[in-house]
Amino acid sequence: MSKTIDFSKNSIMEIGRNSHCVVQEVRAENVFTFSEGILGFEDIKEYVFLLNEKVAPFMFMQALNGSNISFVCVETFLIKPDYSIKLPEANVELLELESPKEALILSLVTVNANMKLFTANLMSPIIINMAKSKGQQFIPDSSIYPVKYNIWKGIEKMKKTEAKAG
């Protein structure tokens, strides 16, 4: 699933002098509501997603509560094509998902000075309902996926698999 929205076309982002994202104007259609917040940030309920070609495939999930809270995310299937989760009915209802095609699955990224050490949290993905602008961090009771999945090792493994298949 590779559906993303380029919010940069709606003038909500510019890159500041220190490579920070600065939200200029936020339109209601660009705001995603997380009714339960994110683990550790439960009081923050509204976010926008900021895209920038310079850091693709990564994006920023910027809080709108007046704080400087921002998370780096990546589309989970880009780094782990065989990723699979089963979303319980309660989560489907909370997100008002009518079809898997409405969902965008993201992983929070832990950034390191050495890009080869970037990791993604595959255990607790961010599920976004693109049609309803709702989001939730899904925290399963148990998971086969790690909290710290090395992004670059995953991409290298994927390329080797594609080369063998092609």
Image (cartoon, grey):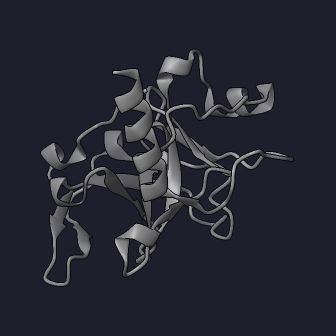
* Position above or below: 35 against 119: above
Question: Relative to residue 113, is residue 134 depicted above or below?
Answer: above
Choose between 157 and 20: the one closer to the eye: 157
Give the quarter of the figure containing the N terminus.
top left
Above/below status of 59 relative to 104: below
Horizontal relation, residue 90 to residue 7: left or right: right
Outermost residue toward the right in this view: 141
Q: Residue furthest front?
A: 164
Picture quadrant of residue 64: bottom left
Residue 2 shows in this picture? no
Quadrant containing the C terminus is top left
Q: In the rendered view, would you say 104 is above or below 22?
A: above
Residue 54 place in picture, x, y as percent: 17, 59
Question: Residue furthest toward the top?
Answer: 99
Q: How many marks?
A: 0
Q: Residue at x 68, y 70 (%)?
A: 40
User: In terms of image quadrants, where is residue 50?
Assistant: bottom left
Q: Is residue 74 visible?
A: yes
Q: Position of residue 59 (x, y in %)?
A: 34, 55
Work out whether residue 132 or residue 86 is closer to the camera in this orientation and state it.
86
Expressed as whole percent of the image width and height from the top left, the position of residue 72 reads 42, 63
Q: At which x and y percent is residue 156?
A: 40, 49
The residue under the point 58% across, 49% down is 34
Picture residue at 84% right of the left edge, 47% below the top: 142
- Quarter assignment of residue 90: top right
| Position of residue 87 in the picture relative to residue 73 (left or right) | right
- x 68%, y 63%: residue: 39
